[in-house]
Image (tube, rainbow, N blue to C red):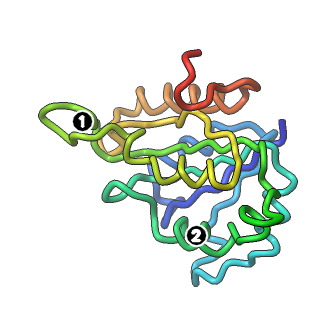
Amino acid sequence: MKTIILVFHPDLAHSRVNKTLVNALGQEFEVRDMYQLYPDFKIDVATEKRYLERAERIVLQFPLYWYSSPALLKQWLDDVLEFGWAYGVGGNALKQKELLLAVSPGASNYGTKNGVEYTVTELLRPFQATSQLIQMKYLKPFVTLGASSISDEKLQAQAKKYSKYLQTEDLPLLGESK
């Protein structure tokens, strides 16, 4: 399966978690460091569309900041997912492709009584809604909790899980029980 990984980390070179996840991936994956490509936030929409059109599975990898994505990801969504291309009349370029989010929130207490009331999946609902609008298959997100305090050993194990997860052909849609 042709998989493209778009990494939206403002400083991937100095990221402990996201860099480790990316470094665990094999050559079969195309990884794009979006902040390196677009430090000025001026996105080449035509180029981005070509990458998306070639892919069967699109992975958006990013740290979760203040319960949301980094700013460049929001800009990318606004610019690239155009009416008539991604949705609306004639907008079916991404129809039936897979969308996977790989997120790394700093805390590990999501969805707990004494922490963040909402689960990570609940906080990612706007991405799920976008996926529905553009007719993509929204896969169960890959979440690395506690990015700010995860041990080296657990991070290495998580990176191996990430690589294996991305190599799995039939990933579950969010809400499926596989």
Residue 101 place in picture, x, y as percent = 56, 44
Outermost residue to the front: 89
Quarter of the image where one finds residue 52: bottom right
Residue at numbered disc 2: 35
Q: Residue flagged by tag 1: what amino acid is it?
A: Asn
Residue located at (68% from left, 67% from top): 81
Q: Nearer the viewer, residue 171 or 62?
A: 171
Residue density around tag 1, few if under 14, some if 14–19, many if 20 or more, within 10 Å: some
Residue 123 place in picture, x, y as percent = 38, 47
Name the secondary structure under disc 1.
loop
Q: Nearer the viewer, residue 44 or 13?
A: 44
CA gap, disc 1 and disc 2? 28 Å
Residue density around tag 2, few if under 14, some if 14–19, many if 20 or more, within 10 Å: some
| Location of the N terminus (image quadrant) | top right
Residue at numbered disc 1: 109
Question: Comparing marks 1 and 2, which lies closer to the viewer?
Answer: 1
Residue 65 place in picture, x, y as percent = 36, 58
Q: Residue flagged by tag 2: what amino acid is it?
A: Tyr
Residue 119 place in picture, x, y as percent = 33, 37
When the figure is inspected, residue 143 is found, relative to residue 135, above or below; the finding is: above
Pointer 1 or 2: first along the chain: 2
Residue located at (71% from left, 71% from top): 83
Q: Nearer the viewer, residue 87 or 73?
A: 87
